[in-house]
Image (cartoon, coloured by chain):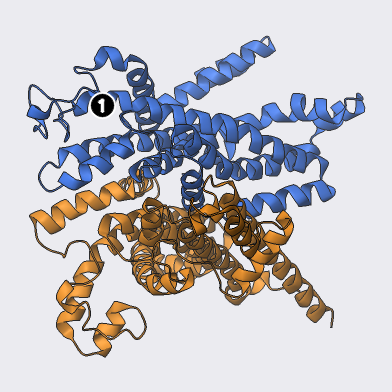
Chain colours: A blue, B orange
Amino acid sequence: MTASIAARSDEPRSRREARRRQMRRGIRRALANPSTFAGGAIVLALFVVALLAPLLATHDPVATNLAGRLAAPGTEHWLGADQLGRDIYSRLLFGAQPTLLIVLLVVVISAPAGLAVGLIAGYLGGWVETTLMRATDIVLAFPRLILALALVAVLKPGLINAVIAIALTAWPNYARIARAETLALRNADYVQAAIGLGMGPVRIMVGQIMPALLPSVAVRATLDMAGIILTAAGLGFLGLGAQPPLAEWGAMISSGRDFIFDAWWVAAVPGFAILLVSLGFNLLGDGLRDVLDPKHHDAS
Amino acid sequence: MTNALALARSAFVGFLTLAVTLTGLLLATFVIGRVMPIDPVVAAVGDKASAETYAAAREALGLDKPIWVQFGRYVEGVGRGDLGKSTVSGRPIVEDIGRAFPATIELATLAIVVGTLIGVPLGVYAAHRRNRRADHVIRFVSLIGYSTPIFWLGLIALLIFYAKLGWVSGPGRIATVYRYTVEVWSGFLLIDTLRSGNLDAFRSALSHLVLPATLLGYVSLAYIARMTRGFMIEELGKEYVTTARIKGASEARVLWGHALPNVMVPLVTVIALSFGHLLEGAVLTETVFAWPGIGLYITSGLFAADMPAVLGGTLVVGICFVALNKLAELLYPLLDPRTRAS
């Protein structure tokens, strides 16, 4: 009780301090939630593994050794070896790189695009809004994986084309969120004040409204990353993602498919990694939503 | 009078959006077909054809026409049910898909039944036990469903339940013995085997179906349970619920009799959407289970460089997807009088 009174009398002295306190409070709240903490730890581990793969690996991820093909997990190969005798543990570590690369590229392309569409539609309204949101709804109604699959198939299978195909269908969610929030903010006092001060629409959209949209977009992006990982893995499984000999988790499962009954670890290990990473992003996204979105503070 | 007018207006707008969405979908598959690096003329006549043959084939395929004319022809063809011919089998793609589609529908239908029958009660229960242990467990189970690569889960399930435990049959739709003995009537094997009175064949079909359907059902369960929980929590906070409780209604009655019927509208949308996702998820699942549906048709088209088959399959799944979304919208007024045009 005394603490809360003390906190209230201790008003932040500057804008920066207020912001810093808010952030600290958010981080504390996020860390206090075990599932957010676990999600954050998994995602952090993914980054560390992707960066330090050359240091952490025990073998060359592409070095074949036919004598040791399909070796069971043990002291030589911690997680076993695949049909070409390649060390699965090392391939798993290196496989974090394309996974992370695809996820980041897709989000970097689709989130700003969706944000721009939603912002413009929400702020300008009228026929611009109708046209943009109708287009958004159309793309949203497309089956994502199948369109990505068809697109990659006619382009050339590969990492970059997989990114393009996934990004082309990933932006509408951001557009919807950005528009809904822009509509709510358009008539906010501070935006009206900015209009009164004579700011142009571009300055208002970019400088005044966009910063307020970023938290929701960040949450959406984190949750989306889980789905992107699954889609990318699906494309890899069908041979449409990163091409061999590059270690990619989906492709690793596909190569283990033929030996699933004899050497289950070849397919089981990379699949578990996908599950873990995707779960990590989902947990983190859920937690971030609780922290950043005041509407969800009491719910869930 | 104004009522009828409003209804007609909303029907017209609805029809227009559907038409625009479908055109967008057609445009997408058309453009994808255009950017393909394979020359369709060479694919038809071979690379040793003379210049005249090439030109004639080009004209016959309509490729000398402006691009919008080509698109118009494409749309017209699809309208007539002509999706082109498979470059591998030479059969019309519509015929191939007609044969494969019931297998996918059978799988997805069973999966959605599993997902709904388990997912909705789980979601209701989680909302009831909010922030208690049961809620956390259900949330975690559905998060795993969200996060699992379904093709991997399929492989692991085959390893455990088919290879190790022998509880179910392996890949495929029915044991080879019965494959040609069952007369095709509806295309749904469970129905066709029962109709022919061959119980052994029915058992075989069921034991092939149960594993992929359960896995797909689990994925949709995850989504349905989560959404049900969210809707229910919102509903349980409303005043009429408090009123019902004060009047002494049992908690079961409050949950199932009062709150659940009121979340049916958004729930039906969720279920329709997950049915669409199941059709999509079937692409990977069918590949793993060698299930001869539209997903396997698309992926084997991929490996055989049979682009008309891939694009035709994509279009059909896309149309179903769009139609399901629309259907959910149309069901609104039937389920909730409040959304009826007034």
For the question of whether residue B9 can be seen, the reply is: yes
What residue is at 65 percent from the left and 42 percent from the top? Answer: A175
Of residues B336 and A114, the one nearer the viewer is A114
Q: Is residue A110 left or right of residue B139?
A: right
Q: What x and y, as percent, mark residue A47?
A: 39, 21
Instruction: Classify the position of the C terminus of chain B by image quarter.
Output: bottom right
For the question of whether residue B243 can be seen, the reply is: no
- Label 1: element kind: helix
Of residues B242 and A152, the one nearer the viewer is A152
What residue is at 48 percent from the left and 51 percent from the top? Answer: B48
- Neighbourhood count class around disc 1 (C-alpha, 10 Å): few under 14, some 14–19, many 20 upward: many
Instruction: Classify the position of the N terminus of chain B by image quarter.
Output: bottom right
Number of callouts: 1
What residue is at 53 percent from the left and 44 percent from the top? Answer: B37
Q: Is residue B55 left or right of residue A40?
A: right
Q: Quadrant of residue B262?
A: bottom right
Q: What x and y, as percent, mark residue B141?
A: 31, 48
Residue denoted by label 1: A91
Q: Is residue A6 left or right of residue B296?
A: right
Q: Chain of mark 1?
A: A
